Amino acid sequence: MSSRDIKDSFKVGSRTVVVQDCDLRGDITIGSGTVLHPRCTILAVGGPIIFGSNNIVEENVVIVNRLRQPMVIGDNNLFEVGCRIESPSIGDWNTFGIRSRVSSFVQVGSNCVVGAGCIVLPSPFPNGSPFTTPQPPELPPKTTDAALLEVPTTDTPMSSPAPTPSGSPAPASPSPASAPSPAPRSAQTPSDSLPDYTHVFGSENRRRKASGEGTGQAKALFVKHWEYLRETLPKHHKLKMF
């Protein structure tokens, strides 16, 4: 779908600060108190995007919904400069660091922190968890000696079997039509989630479960940041008129 085929539909709550030069396309609902910085991009290419209240979206942030289902973003989330978010579901009080990336198949809980430059991709194990060790794959059954004798050779024609040392002809090879066909694999879409209080950090995008200590102090700092932006941005930037 091209950008020309996207129909714009905006619903903006009260006390919302939306700077004029931010790019909004598609069906977007912005909750009350949300602050959108200049040069941020929000694209509802597939389904709609629904913001909660009191979110902060900083410069050069890209939020895209490529799925048909709605992208639901909770309250009091901080999207720092240059991050790209495609998660279909985001909880409350999350922080996405500078130039971080979150895939469209990863759901984010609440009170999570994605460090600067970190990339969150879905787990390659459908039933796995980021905090559990995946089970080893099942090994194929052992091949018996009788099964090895039935494997045809490539250098001997099928019409004239090679004689054995005892003078008796070799057993006939099974036809390809009689061989069992492999079962088709079921196509599964990889999916993953960040549970509550998960921190993603480091160059290897490692994950750990935080204890929740200091959450109140972090929330108080977020509220001060939000209040400062609501007072400063309208003084230096033109706002969108809806």
Image (cartoon, rainbow, N blue to C red):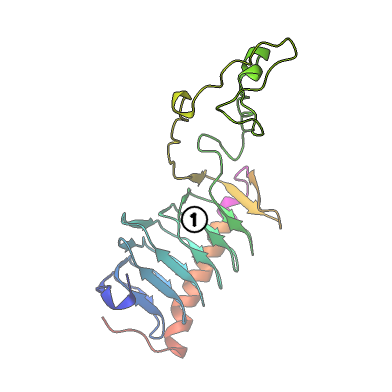
Residue 238 visible to an observer of this rendering: yes
Across the whole image, how many numbered discs are drawn on residues?
1
Residue at the (50%, 38%) spot, across then down: 126
Residue at the (57%, 54%) spot, across then down: 120
- SS for callout 1: loop
Q: Is residue 130 magenta?
A: no
Q: Position of residue 23 (x, y in %)?
A: 39, 79
Q: Quadrant of residue 156?
A: top right
Q: Position of residue 61 (x, y in %)?
A: 50, 72
Task: Say if 231 sits above or below 98 in the image.
Answer: below
What is the quadrant of the N terminus in the image? bottom left
Tell me the amino acid under the disc marked 1.
Answer: Trp
Instruction: Depth check: give the residue in front, 2 or 66.
Output: 2
Instruction: Depth check: give the residue in front, 216 or 188.
Output: 188
Residue numbers of the magenta segment: 209-217
Tell me if 185 is positioned left or right of 200 in this view.
Answer: left
Task: Say if 237 sits above or below 113 in the image.
Answer: below
Residue 33 visible to an observer of this rendering: no
Q: Quadrant of residue 237?
A: bottom left
Crowdedness near tag 1: few (<14), some (14–19) or many (≥20) residues, C-alpha within 10 Å: many
Q: Position of residue 37 (x, y in %)?
A: 46, 78
The residue under label 1 is: 93
Q: Position of residue 5 (x, y in %)?
A: 26, 74
Task: Say if 70 sits above or below 3 in the image.
Answer: above
Instruction: Depth check: give the residue in front, 51 or 117.
Output: 117
Instruction: Depth check: give the residue in front, 120 or 184.
Output: 184
Tell me if 136 is positioned left or right of 48 in this view.
Answer: right
What is the quadrant of the C terminus in the image? bottom left
Tell me if 229 is positioned left or right of 68 in this view.
Answer: right
Tell me if 11 is positioned left or right of 19 in this view.
Answer: left
| The residue positioned farthest toward the right in the image shown | 165
